[in-house]
Amino acid sequence: MFRKSVLIGTALIFLVSAGSVYAASARDYISIVGSSTVYPFATVVAEQFGKTTSYKTPKIESTGSGGGLKLFCAGVGVEHPDITNASRAIKKSEYDKCQKNGVKEIVEVKIGYDGIVVANSKKTAPMKLTRKDLFLALAKDVPNPKGGETLVPNPYKTWKDVNPSLPNVKIEVLGPPPTSGTRDAFVELAMEGGAKKFDWIKAMKKKDKKAYKAICHTVREDGAYVEAGENDNLIVQKLDANPNALGIFGFSFLDQNTDIIQGSFVDGVQPTFDAIADGQYPVSRPLFFYVKKAHVGVIPGIQEYLNEFTSDKAWGPDGYLSEKGMIPMPDEERAQFQSDVKALKPITMK
Amino acid sequence: MTVDVKTTAGVSGIGQTGRILYDRESRETVGEPFVEGARMTCRGVNVYYGDKHAIKNVALDIGRNEVVAMIGPSGCGKSTFLRCLNRMNDTIDTCRVEGEITLDGMDIYGKEVDVVPLRAQVGMVFQKPNPFPKSIYDNVAYGPRIHGLAQNKVELDEIVETSLRKAGLWEEVKDLMTHPGTGLSGGQQQRLCIARTIAVSPEVILMDEPCSALDPIATSIIEDLIDELKQQFSIAIVTHSMQQASRVSQRTAYFHLGDLIEVGDTAQIFTTPRHQLTQDYITGRFG
Amino acid sequence: MNNPSSQPNGLNPQGRRAIEIVNAGLARRYRKERRFRLYGISAILASLLFLSFLFGSIISKGYSAFQQTFIQLDIFFDPAILSQESLSTANYPGIVKQSLRQMFPEVKSRQDKRMLYRLVSSGASFQIRQMVLDSPEMIGQTLQVWVIADDDIDMLEKGHFDLEAPEGERRIKDIQLAWVDRLKKESRIEKRFNRILFTAGDSREPELAGILGAVAGSFYTLLVTLLLSFPIGIASAVYLEEFATQNRWTDLIEVNINNLAAVPSIVFGLLGLAVFLNFFGLPRSAPLVGGLVLTLMTLPTIIIASRASLQSVPPSIREAALGIGASKMQMVTHHVLPLALPGILTGTIIGMARALGESAPLLMIGMVAFIVDVPGGFTDPSTVLPVQIFLWADSPERAFVERTSAATIVLLAFLIIMNASAVYLRKKFERRW
């Protein structure tokens, strides 16, 4: 028995070293990391690509935008990913890190938009909210309701307290935790947008950016905002069970569950496909992916994957990505990015 | 434990009965511990368990073709001493053995001595029957197999058969060779263990209270067997039963609190003990 | 012998007979026992209740995933589309669409046609493609083919849609309902056993998604874990238990092994990322690395179980072997290990079962990923069953809800099989003869 164990052990050591050699020598599939928001769209493209071409299906990891860029910028070589998805544009600091690690040429591809919806159960009437309402209802500290340019801990208990035109129900919002890109986008687009309606807060942005961000981006922690985990399906189920609660998630979940939940109006616009596509709906964000130019031609299939992604049957207005809930870009913008991708035009950041 | 005041006082001298009193200082053994042409000799053996001094300066010989019985109250060190003879105490980390023990003139605690062949020469039978959870055949064949005593299956079969015959078990188990050894009765199991021990042809067999877990009938069978075995082997047996010691042994050694108090012919020890402690023990005043 | 409290004739100092006092207290003693048994039974009942609730909810949600809706189409294998030269890249979706158009000639508008095409899954065209590639002689014929229905139709058939809701808010429109009704009248819709679930890798289309990729990934990962942790675990346990002398170093090692067993599993993932990926440069998302990480995680469990099992081997067996002249190694391999093996196996299988259900440490080494191709080796990118469950649970499509539960059922089945085999092996080998 011991001899056998020794044999197996040796075999495994060989296997490990063989694995090392393998990793250093070749990879015949595209490795993609990044945002969990882009993940449902990228995976559809990857699957389509894998089924209709002779290339292997790309491997897609959902690591979050920041995590993806960190992996992406770690260096050039088969052990590093070829493409990273992001639900926001690359930051200067991340770009610098890429440059430092030898990832010189990065191609940016904007793929479309994602709307962040505030939704409730179909069993009640849709809410007519403004971004200001959302800020006042969900921020940790809000401007003193009695006037003046001071902050008080959020005193509002019901939506009626926030805005007399809203129903008299308890504020109860289920949303993603701080690690989520959806949460980042929500506080940035909805809450910050609402906070800006107060002139003195808006003025702070120039004077004290840190304090400004703290006011706009800090969500209350007294139980009115419930962190429901990253699982958006769970939020949908909870909304169905509790008609008084609101939920925050990506548009694709609303799109798939229109018989259970409805999107609230934000600044008078309901989150529909068209309203997000033409930019009327205020809480929407662009989605991107970034390609390591040095890997194109080394890892088989990257160019073809890009072609698949930027084809009209994928990201066009009638493409299969729109069926999955992604909001396509206007025609000119698509054409622009399509030609940039063809030319593999790298971004520059000074 | 009640011990006569005089004996524990640590005074040397002759008591009223004319017997030598126990003397902690000199540690002299009463009687003759040495024999002519001994198989094993022990000189100045001291055993320590950590700080505890378990065996104190013991000298004793084990002669050829004789049964030496070791008796004494619980905790007197007789089992410890027995286990020194095949270095079973090596398995206890804290145990330290001093002094000289020889087997056929060879110091068994010498640096160059390997315990594996030593234990093949000095076999051991334990208090509780402990057959391996294997077949009867495999139990007996195990020793010859690991030592490579048999060239082939036929020789091995022969060793197994003769060993079982010597152990007086052959007739009972010859048709049950593939049956588990643990399925036998207690007495049979102990005889199986004896067969297992003699299968490697040892020179000395150590028996550590071999009958304490057995009923009287099984005990008497084993005792008869011991009597047979002494034709071929030297046997050292530790026992709690003085009747047993008197029945099976030629010489008897009486241990007390790590000291070897008295050694002598079994008949002499049990009829006319010379030491007060021996007298007290065999007459049942303590133990 | 002179106990002052013991009085003659069984009388205590108060003058009562001892037996009276015993009898007086008897009822209280029995009450206590009854109460304790009641607590025990209610504890068991409570845990059974939770368990049945868990199983009930998973099975009631997941059983429907074992069936899949199929639609029968009259497929005309059009020689105009299927030219011999490029059979593998021909326009198969076109064939499916053509067939649908012929079955519903009244559908004219572009919008309606798109809805019509959405009755069947995008997998249907791959199905047709495979048929043609397998037997090209069918080109030119018209055959009745059962193709996979779209997940929305599947959900409709399984009653997961609220048809009372206004049309604008339903994923299934009235016109589609009418088509489905017509298909049903012609008995062109039926539910069959969902083979895809067991024979396909992951997919973003729920009706095409299967667990085979994840099962294969789990298999390779666990194989690596078993091959490494079993011998290493036994060797460490045997060394520590049988050979090492007790001193401060062995105490330290023992404490650390026990600590490792309690370390959160994500920590092993971080370790794996730092050591296996960054230092040794092993491939990301590979079962090899997953197995190595899970080995680190399971080793303490196996070592602790093995040591406990070795300790329980009676010392008399060791003495018997040593007394006959067996070396320590022979004593261990011939006698102690075989006797300890049932316990070691049980510990190993329980450790393996834990490794099978683990997903957190694999997150760090890239095994939480969308992987379509079924892995064929130790370095292919792959995922594992619990990760697949996690990924599906997070997918927006409604049909993934039941598939999540179905995958959970499969995982539970594997766990039950493993734990049952642990019990079986213990029973089988534990015969102490």
Image: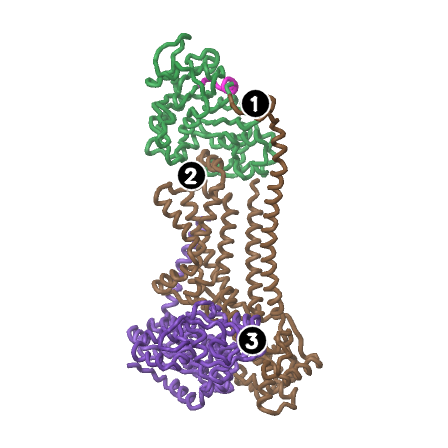
Chain colours: A purple, B green, C brown
**What whole-number distance in Å separates the C-alpha atoms at marks 3 and 2?**
75 Å
Q: Quadrant of residue A239?
A: bottom right
Q: Position of residue C87 (x, y in %)?
A: 54, 83
* Residue picked out by circle 3: A121
Chain of the residue that carries numbered disc 3 in the rendered image: A
In the rendered image, the residue lying farthest to the bottom is C108
**What whole-number distance in Å separates the C-alpha atoms at marks 1 and 2?**
59 Å
Given residues C326 and A258, the one toward you in this image is A258
Q: Are marks 3 and 2 on the same chain?
A: no
Residue, x 59% and y 54% (percent of image)?
Answer: C46
> Which residues lie in the magenta part?
B243-252
For the residue labelled by badge 2, is the local secondary structure a helix, a strand or a loop? loop
Quadrant location of the C terminus of chain C in the rendered image? top right
Q: Relative to A330, does residue B274 appear above or below in the rendering?
A: above
In the rendered image, the residue lying farthest to the right is C185
Given residues B176 and C363, the one toward you in this image is C363
* Residue picked out by circle 2: C327
Tell me the tag on residue A284. none
Near mark 2 (Cα within 10 A), the count class, few <14, some 14-19 or many ≥20, is some
Q: Nearer the viewer, mark 1 or mark 2?
A: 1
* Residue picked out by circle 1: C7
Q: Position of residue C294 (x, y in %)?
A: 44, 58
Q: Are marks 3 and 1 on the same chain?
A: no
Instruction: Answer whether residue A103 is visible to the viewer in this image.
Output: no
Q: Quadrant of residue B89?
A: top left
Secondary structure mostly seen in the magenta stretch: helix
Chain of the residue that carries numbered disc 2 in the rendered image: C
Q: Relative to A26, does residue A52 appear above or below in the rendering?
A: below
Near mark 3 (Cα within 10 A), the count class, few <14, some 14-19 or many ≥20, is many
Chain of the residue that carries numbered disc 1 in the rendered image: C
**Tag 2: residue type?**
Ser
Instruction: Answer whether residue C78 is visible to the viewer in this image.
Output: yes
